[in-house]
């Protein structure tokens, strides 16, 4: 051991000094570059458009990537997303043809976006310094005007485009619509608002929100015009806010309640809890009827649109640490109810779930993957009371199981059940008679 130690040669002071001189500048630059690439603190409230990492969003990160069109800086220039680039310029030309006679030209659009260039940069969680000021403004004007013109055409306020909206097949339109709702494909909502106000020449549309809600209704049923204006930070967030029920806390529970999960739908049915389809303005409005011990769930159609919408909204809530987390709470609640094919079939029979083109197994896998590896504390969420109330009902699980078994037995063979009850009554009568005789001969 000693010989081994003696064989080692210590680094000389001169060598240490050389390494220090070489590493100090490069490591200092690496620190600055890392801080710059993270764009300051990603936890700041101004950050609202995120890149979604697989570890953060579980199995839903893939749904946050655009398929057909790039919007914003994260996927700008990617070769597989070039099919709509020419259409963007054509849409901008069409818009300017309509606004120029009213004194609104391209220079006005550039000015209104350029004035907020620094604010735009602060909205992205990762550095976009690889885009110069002019390049970023150019991108925002082009992408923003494309979105606004597309929304106007969808709502019927301007003539529909012959190429995209008339001659294109439905797959192209659906792919484009979904891409406008993907988290990594967003632009700040204030950019869209500024461009909309600048180009709203005829004043036929009261607000950008109304256009957006017409667009949202293509994916989910809901009002086209809202009363109270939600303050979304981008299109995806505005859609998310529009789904949140106003009556968020209908049942209060104790702070000490520690429930984090619930049983599956099939297990709840075995203990006497029923399920029914309920009517509501949004699918988030789940209600539990204590008297009837019935859980009312609004109908949802499980398809590729819902997969895209829920996945991106859950990812957004996870990335920005939303306190409310309504979509995540809903996804976790439904994920607890749906574990197996039998759970899906039960909710299908109750008209709660409609899964066009998807098997029961696919639906169960969808809800299982939606919140996979997602951290969320249900306490304080709008469904917290439902977690607690449903678990409280399990206190009477044994009694309800016995009752249910008796009913099933009576349904299968009522005469055998009646015969069994007659035997029980006879035995009780015999025991009572014996007890009476014993009391007579052996009084206390």
Image (cartoon, rainbow, N blue to C red):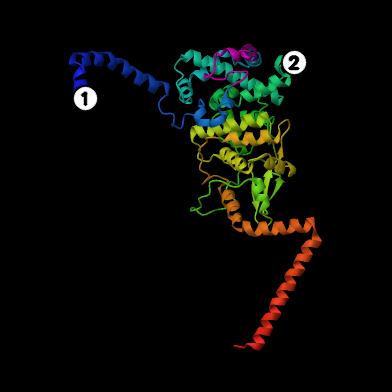
Q: Residue at x 21, y 14 (%)?
A: 15
In the rendered image, the quadrant that contains the C terminus is bottom right
Above or below for 331 versus 396: above
Which numbered disc, 1 or 2, marks the residue closer to the eye? Answer: 1
Q: CA distance from mark 1 to mark 2?
A: 82 Å
Residue drawn at x 78%, y 65% is 418
Question: In the rendered image of this protein, does residue 257 appear above or below residue 60?
Answer: below
The magenta stretch is 66-92
Q: Is residue 296 magenta?
A: no
* Nearer to the camera, 389 or 232: 389
Task: Pinpoint residue 360: horizontal percent, then vertical percent.
Answer: 70, 36
Residue assigned mark 2: 167
Horizontal relation, residue 148 to residue 57: left or right? right
| Residue toward you, 4 or 272 | 4
Of residues 401 and 148, the one drawn nearer to the viewer in this rendering: 401
Badge 2 element:
helix
Residue on which the image places disc 1:
1
Q: Position of residue 289 (x, y in %)?
A: 66, 53
Question: In this rendering, is residue 115 above or below 374?
Answer: above
């Amino acid at each position: 051991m000693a010989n081994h130690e003696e064989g080692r040669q210590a680094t000389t002071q001169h060598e240490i000094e050389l390494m220090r001189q070489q590493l100090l500048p490069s490591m200092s630059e690496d620190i600055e570059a890392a801080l710059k690439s993270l764009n300051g603190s990603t936890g700041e409230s101004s950050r609202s458009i995120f890149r979604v990492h697989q570890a953060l969003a579980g199995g839903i990160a893939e749904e946050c990537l655009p398929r057909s069109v790039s919007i914003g800086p994260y996927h700008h220039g990617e070769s597989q997303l070039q099919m709509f680039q020419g259409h963007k310029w054509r849409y901008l030309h069409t818009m300017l043809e309509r606004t120029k006679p009213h004194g609104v030209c391209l220079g006005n659009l550039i000015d209104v976006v350029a004035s907020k260039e620094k604010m735009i940069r602060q909205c992205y969680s990762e550095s976009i310094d690889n885009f110069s000021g002019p390049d970023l403004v150019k991108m925002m004007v082009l992408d923003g005007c494309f979105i606004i013109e597309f929304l106007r055409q969808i709502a019927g306020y301007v003539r529909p485009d012959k190429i995209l909206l008339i001659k294109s097949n439905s797959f192209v339109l659906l792919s484009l619509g979904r891409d406008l709702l993907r988290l990594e494909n967003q632009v700040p909502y204030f950019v869209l608002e500024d461009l909309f106000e600048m180009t709203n020449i005829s004043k036929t549309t009261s607000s950008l929100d109304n256009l957006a809600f017409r667009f949202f209704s293509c994916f989910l049923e809901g009002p086209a015009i809202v009363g109270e204006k939600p303050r979304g930070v981008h299109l995806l967030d505005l859609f998310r806010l529009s789904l949140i029920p106003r009556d968020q806390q209908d049942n209060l529970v104790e702070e000490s309640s520690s429930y984090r999960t619930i049983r599956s739908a099939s297990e709840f049915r075995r203990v006497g809890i029923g399920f029914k389809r309920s009517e509501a303005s949004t699918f988030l409005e789940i209600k539990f009827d204590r008297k009837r011990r019935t859980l009312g769930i609004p109908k949802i159609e499980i398809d590729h649109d819902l997969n895209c919408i829920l996945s991106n909204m859950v990812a957004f809530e996870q990335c920005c640490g939303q306190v409310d987390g309504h979509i995540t709470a809903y996804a976790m609640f439904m994920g607890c109810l749906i574990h197996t094919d039998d759970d899906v079939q039960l909710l299908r029979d109750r008209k709660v779930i409609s899964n066009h083109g998807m098997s029961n197994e696919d639906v169960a896998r969808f809800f299982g993957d939606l919140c996979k590896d997602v951290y969320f504390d249900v306490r304080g969420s709008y469904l917290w009371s439902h977690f607690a109330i449903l678990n409280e009902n399990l206190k009477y699980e044994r009694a309800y199981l016995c009752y249910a078994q008796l009913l099933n037995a009576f349904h299968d063979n009522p005469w055998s059940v009646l015969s069994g009850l007659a035997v029980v009554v006879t035995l009780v009568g015999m025991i009572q008679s014996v007890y009476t005789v014993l009391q007579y001969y052996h009084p206390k």
